[in-house]
Image (cartoon, helix red, strand yellow):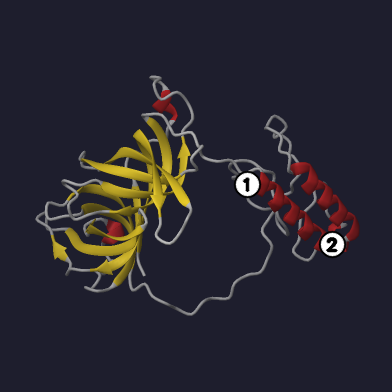
C-alpha cells in the first residue's frame, strides 16, 4: 500500500505522440509525451517527462504552454542523471498565447510542485548538520508509464519550528502519509523534500459511520465561497448581485424540479424566496439525477 502524487504548474515542451501495445490485446493506446522541468525550492532544476493519455486525434499542447497537473511520479535513485517520470492523472492547460510576454503574469505564484505520498520509512531518523533539522528516507511504489516503479524521497523537517516541536519522529518500517515540496537533490539518490504535514502509523482502522445525505445542488459557478443557509442548502436561484454572471444551461431544469418539490412538500411551505433541496424529497432527488446527467454530457476535455 503506497503511492506518490505530485501536483502544481509545469511548463511543457517537445511534445510527441506515442503508441502503446499491450501483450494479448489487439487495441492500441495513444499517449502524448512532454518534456518539462521540476523546480526545487533551493533553485535546483530536475528534468522530467510527462506521459498523458490522449486519443490519436487530440491536439497536442504547444511548446512552453503551462498546465496545472496532478500526476503519479517515479523518483529514481539516479535523479542526477535520469529524468523523473510523470504519469498524468489530470492536465489542465493555462489558456493563452505562450509566446506572449504577458502569458505567465496571470498564473498563480506556485512554481514548486507539491508532493503527497504514502510509503514506508526505510532509515532511522537522523539529525542534520544544522542541529535542528531531522531527516528520514521514504520509499513507495506505483504504476507509472504502465509498469510498477519505485520512488525514494528524503523527508526533512525543522524541529525548531513551533509546528514541529512536539512531532514524534517515525520509526523505521513505519507507514506514513506526508505532504511537502521538492527542495533539493540528494547526492546519494532521490530528492530532498521539505515536509509540510505528516501522519504516522497509517493502517487499516474501523470505518466511521458514513452519512447518507444527498449532496447539495447549487448554481453552476466555477468556484463558490458561500456557506449553506441554516436548515438547508444553497438555493439554485440567482441571487442579487449574480445577474451579471454567465448563465448556465443546467440552472433552469434544476429550478423546475425545485419548484415542483416546493409545491408538493409540506416542509417547503415555510420557505420564503428560495427553493431548498432536501434528502427526503423524491422529486428533488430526480432533479439531482438529471443535473448529473447534464453535467456528464457537458464535460470538456483538457486539450
Q: Which residue is mark 1?
A: 226
Disc on res. 83: none
Residue under the image location 59 percent in, 41 percent down: 300
Q: Residues within 10 Å of mark 2 (few under 14, many from 20)?
A: some
Q: Residue 173 lies in what quarter of the image?
A: bottom left
Q: Quadrant of the N terminus?
A: bottom left
What percent of the width, then of the height, locates residue 297? 67, 46
What percent of the width, then of the height, locates residue 102? 41, 21
Q: Residue 175 lies in what quarter of the image?
A: bottom left
Count of numbered labels shown in the rendering: 2
Question: The residue tagged with tag 2: helix, strand or loop?
Answer: helix
Q: Tell whether label 2 touches label 1 (CB within 8 Å).
A: no
Q: Which residue is mark 2?
A: 267
User: Horizontally, is 146 left or right of 193 in the view?
Assistant: right
- Front position in the image: 206 or 16: 16
Q: Residue 277 lies in what quarter of the image?
A: bottom right
What percent of the width, then of the height, locates residue 74? 29, 54
User: Horizontally, is 72 left or right of 209 in the view?
Assistant: left
Please tell me which of labels 1 and 2 falls first in the chain. Answer: 1
Residue under the image location 34 percent in, 59 percent down: 147
User: Horizontally, is 47 left or right of 66 in the view?
Assistant: left
Query: Is 51 rendered above or below residue 122?
Result: above
User: Horizontally, is 298 left or right of 126 in the view?
Assistant: right
What is the distance, in whole Å, between disc 1 and disc 2 at their CAs?
A: 23 Å
- Front position in the image: 154 or 301: 301
Q: Residues within 10 Å of mark 1 (few under 14, many from 20)?
A: few
Question: The residue tagged with tag 1: helix, strand or loop?
Answer: loop
What percent of the width, then of the height, locates residue 158? 22, 56
- Front position in the image: 87 or 41: 87
Asked if residue 231 shows in the view, the reply is yes
Residue at the far bottom: name it.
Answer: 206
Amino acid at each position: 500500500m503506497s503511492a506518490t502524487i505530485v501536483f502544481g504548474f509545469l511548463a511543457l515542451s517537445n511534445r510527441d505522440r506515442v503508441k502503446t501495445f499491450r501483450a494479448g490485446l489487439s487495441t492500441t493506446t495513444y499517449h502524448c509525451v512532454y518534456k518539462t522541468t521540476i523546480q526545487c525550492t533551493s533553485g535546483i532544476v530536475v528534468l522530467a517527462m510527462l506521459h498523458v493519455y490522449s486519443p490519436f486525434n487530440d491536439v497536442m499542447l504547444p511548446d512552453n504552454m503551462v498546465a496545472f497537473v496532478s500526476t503519479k511520479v517515479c523518483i529514481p535513485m539516479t535523479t542526477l542523471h535520469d529524468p523523473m517520470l510523470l504519469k498524468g492523472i489530470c492536465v489542465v492547460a493555462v489558456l493563452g498565447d505562450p509566446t506572449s510576454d504577458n502569458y505567465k503574469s496571470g498564473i498563480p505564484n506556485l512554481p514548486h510542485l507539491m508532493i503527497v505520498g504514502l510509503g514506508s520509512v526505510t532509515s532511522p531518523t537522523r539529525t542534520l548538520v544544522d542541529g535542528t533539522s531531522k531527516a528520514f528516507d521514504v520509499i513507495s511504489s506505483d504504476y507509472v508509464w504502465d509498469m510498477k516503479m519505485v520512488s525514494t524521497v528524503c523527508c526533512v523537517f525543522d524541529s525548531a519550528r513551533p509546528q514541529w516541536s512536539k512531532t514524534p519522529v517515525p520509526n523505521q518500517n513505519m507507514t506514513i502519509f506526508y505532504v511537502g515540496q521538492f527542495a533539493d537533490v540528494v547526492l546519494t539518490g532521490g530528492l530532498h523534500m521539505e515536509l509540510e504535514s505528516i501522519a504516522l502509523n497509517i493502517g487499516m482502522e474501523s470505518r466511521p459511520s458514513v452519512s447518507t445525505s444527498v449532496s447539495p445542488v447549487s448554481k453552476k459557478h466555477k468556484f463558490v465561497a458561500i456557506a449553506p443557509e441554516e436548515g438547508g442548502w444553497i438555493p439554485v436561484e440567482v441571487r442579487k448581485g449574480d445577474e451579471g454572471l454567465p448563465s448556465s444551461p443546467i440552472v433552469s431544469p434544476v429550478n423546475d424540479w425545485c419548484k415542483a418539490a416546493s409545491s408538493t412538500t409540506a416542509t417547503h411551505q415555510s420557505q420564503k424566496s428560495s427553493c431548498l433541496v432536501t434528502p427526503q424529497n423524491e422529486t428533488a432527488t430526480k432533479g439531482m439525477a438529471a443535473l448529473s446527467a447534464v453535467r456528464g454530457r457537458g464535460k470538456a476535455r483538457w486539450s
